[in-house]
């Protein structure tokens, strides 16, 4: 096994396959690996993939790491200790939050800044960050910064960022604090005053600046990308009386980029009077990647003096009216907006159309224009430019440029093109200087698509590379999935009917090793598909289904049963393919998860083939009927009468799950009776 320092270097590097292996090896090193990890300065790039690995490391060693992090916050010595981010590796832990609260409250005796803060407030900044990532209540931070002009001036940004990450990751309903923070500024007499309710109002430096709003929307919220947050904003902020709240909410919706938000965004756009808010809503329509969104962008562009031009450039190719899309894109290319014109050439190429400016753009002095021209000719399949693109890649000034050119060459089908693209990606994502790294997660969606198209050009030989990089584009899990303890991996497989020891993560949740009173052949196989945002409700359902397991009527499988080192995609496909019953735990998060949607399609395929019975269980209110009750199918969901488990006027969730378990028992007994 390589030295610990070398493992850590690979863990924090850019290659997703090597990084995942380093994560497993570092965990296998146990306490020695942890000591090495925390004995050196902890630095993170903004790379989502590196953050994902570090959070999974924390989630796999929660108890020992928690003590280290709490102690580190106690002795935080600089402005923002990157270790504060690692608190996001824990579930919402009351003891951990209380330990952080003890530190923060010590900074504010009697609710006011301590004397130590006046000489050095930087440790408090780190503690605020740790509080937010741990999921602490955001109102606590508002309470502290609002009482003192000094605290507001020095810590308002820290409180805002911490509130955003807590809301984005785990506390979607805590929007009130953010509202207060972004609508107040420090007045002349060191008292907070409400910012004027006009977009033309001059906002002083004593308020949360607009760049901070954009930064939080474009980083904290997109990093976790949760459906609950979109629902909260569309329900609470889209009609808010203060323009600044609507503005920030629209920016967040744009960053989230959910397809299901198209209709409410279009409705909001129709009544919005503030141009800068409309711009963010138009951005949201581009980001949600639907024909409806693209159609709305074209219509708005044509009747509003070209408002939304930068967003239409990237999205028009998705429109249902191909002619209208081509006409709009040609107008954009002819405009004075070089960036949008360059992006429009890629969209036009996706529609199979070239443009007179395309070939000259390959020689442009603007590197962004050159890169987009390269992608456009690649999508057009023009192999006459292979030599030129190869020379451009070899002469590229930076890693981002090399990645885009490697993607173009791979799309054109050059030998080993996908492998070369992988190497360029790994090098760009693992640059020594963190601030110079290319993070695929934060690239424009259409550039992400081009990278995946390039990797796909390698066929079956590069499918592992394509899937590894595709995973880098997924948001972080609000509760990171821990890896199995490494010492369990080396043990021989138990006897067929043996009961394995439950891991710490399996306490109080479904962890089935096989029926206890009947052979596995007699038990129906139940596959559970769910969003990890709904993990606690999945665990609660499992408790209610345990009598069925104990009686040998069913055995249950879900993705928490996957052990470290296993091919998770293969295992999921194998289990869902062999299931008798597929429970689909439906919520907005489920409908917005790429993986859940894939499992849903597999479930419907199994139903059509007569191999399995999918049963939707509605956890939270959402548009589930459009999926399960339509012309070609009508699937009964539980609970009946459109009463979701949460918000369905049940006395509590246990009451709903008890009814569901009773219904499932009847279904299972009938299915077994047929045998």
Image (cartoon, grey):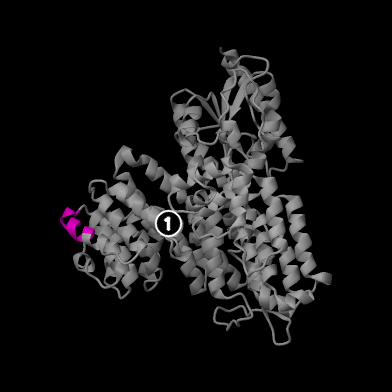
Q: Is 323 covered by the magenta stretch?
A: no
Q: Is residue 228 above or below residue 556?
A: below
Q: Position of residue 108 (x, y in %)?
A: 79, 70
Q: Residue 583, located in which quarter of the rendered image?
A: top right
Left or right of 463 in this view: 99: right
Left or right of 336 in this view: 199: right
Query: Which residue carries the number 1 mark?
Result: 429
Depth check: 283 or 360 in front? 360
Residue 135 shows in the view:
no
Name the residue furthest right: 110
Q: Position of residue 131 (x, y in %)?
A: 69, 60
Highlighted magenta segment, given as a residue range:
382-390
Q: Position of residue 646 (x, y in %)?
A: 68, 44
Q: Is residue 529 above or below residue 175?
A: above
Left or right of 309 in this view: 248: right
Name the residue furthest top: 675
Secondary structure that dominates the magenta span: helix
């Amino acid at each position: 096994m390589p030295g610990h320092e070398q493992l850590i270097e690979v863990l924090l590097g850019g290659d997703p396959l090597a990084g995942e292996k380093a994560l497993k090896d570092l965990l296998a090193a146990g306490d020695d690996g942890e000591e090495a990890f925390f004995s050196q300065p902890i630095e993170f790039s903004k790379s989502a993939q590196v953050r994902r690995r570090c959070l999974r490391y924390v989630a796999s060693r929660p108890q020992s790491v928690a003590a280290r992090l709490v102690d580190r916050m106690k002795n935080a010595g600089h402005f923002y200790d990157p270790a504060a981010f690692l608190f996001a590796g824990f579930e919402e832990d009351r003891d951990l939050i209380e330990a952080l609260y003890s530190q923060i409250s010590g900074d504010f005796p009697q609710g006011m800044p301590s004397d130590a803060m006046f000489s050095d407030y930087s440790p408090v900044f780190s503690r605020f960050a740790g509080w937010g990532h741990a999921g602490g209540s955001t109102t606590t931070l508002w309470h502290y910064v609002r009482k003192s002009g000094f605290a507001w001036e020095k810590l308002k940004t820290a409180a805002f960022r911490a509130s955003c990450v807590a809301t984005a990751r785990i506390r979607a309903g805590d929007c009130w604090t953010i509202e207060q923070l972004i609508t107040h500024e420090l007045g002349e007499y060191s008292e907070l005053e409400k910012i004027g309710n006009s977009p033309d109002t001059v906002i002083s430096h004593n308020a949360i600046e607009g760049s901070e709003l954009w930064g939080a929307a474009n980083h904290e919220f997109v990093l976790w990308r949760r459906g609950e947050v979109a629902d909260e904003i569309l329900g609470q902020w889209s009609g808010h009386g203060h323009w600044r709240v609507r503005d920030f909410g629209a920016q967040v919706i744009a960053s989230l980029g959910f397809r299901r938000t198209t209709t409410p965004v279009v409705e909001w756009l129709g009544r919005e009077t503030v141009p800068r808010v409309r711009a963010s809503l138009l951005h949201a329509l581009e980001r949600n990647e639907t024909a409806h969104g693209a159609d709305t962008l074209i219509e708005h562009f044509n009747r509003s003096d070209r408002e939304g031009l930068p967003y239409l450039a990237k999205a028009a190719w998705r429109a249902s009216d191909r002619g209208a899309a081509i006409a709009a894109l040609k107008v954009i290319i002819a405009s004075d907006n070089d960036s949008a014109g360059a992006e429009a050439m890629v969209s036009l190429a996706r529609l199979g159309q070239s443009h007179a400016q395309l070939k000259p753009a390959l020689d442009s002095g603007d590197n962004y224009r050159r890169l987009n021209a390269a992608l456009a000719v690649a999508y057009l399949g023009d192999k006459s430019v292979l030599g030129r693109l190869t020379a451009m890649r070899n002469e590229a000034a930076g890693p981002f440029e090399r990645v885009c050119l490697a993607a173009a060459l791979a799309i054109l089908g050059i030998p080993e093109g996908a492998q070369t693209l992988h190497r360029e990606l790994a090098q760009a994502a693992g640059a020594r200087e963190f601030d110079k790294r290319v993070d695929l997660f934060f690239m424009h969606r259409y550039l992400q698509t081009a990278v995946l198209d390039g990797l796909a050009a390698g066929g079956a030989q590069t499918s592992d590379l394509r899937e590894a990089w595709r995973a880098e584009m997924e948001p972080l899990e609000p509760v990171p999935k821990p890896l199995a303890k490494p010492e369990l991996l080396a043990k021989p497989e138990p006897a067929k009917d043996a009961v394995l020891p439950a891991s710490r993560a399996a306490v109080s949740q479904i962890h089935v090793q096989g029926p206890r009173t009947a052979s596995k052949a007699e038990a129906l196989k139940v596959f559970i598909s769910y969003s990890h945002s709904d993990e606690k409700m999945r665990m609660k359902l499992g408790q209610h289904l345990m009598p069925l397991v104990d009686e040998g009527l069913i055995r249950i499988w879900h993705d928490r049963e996957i052990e470290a080192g296993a091919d998770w995609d293969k295992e999921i496909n194998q289990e869902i393919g062999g299931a008798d019953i597929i429970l689909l735990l439906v919520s907005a998060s489920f409908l917005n998860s790429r993986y859940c949607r894939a499992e849903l399609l597999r479930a419907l395929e199994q139903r059509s083939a007569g191999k399995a019975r999918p049963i939707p269980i509605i956890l939270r209110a959402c548009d589930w009927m459009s999926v399960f009750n339509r012309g070609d199918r009508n699937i009964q969901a539980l609970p009946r009468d459109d009463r979701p488990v949460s918000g369905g006027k049940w006395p509590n969730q246990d009451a709903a799950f008890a009814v569901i378990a009773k219904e499932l028992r009847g279904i299972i007994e009938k299915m077994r009776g047929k045998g």
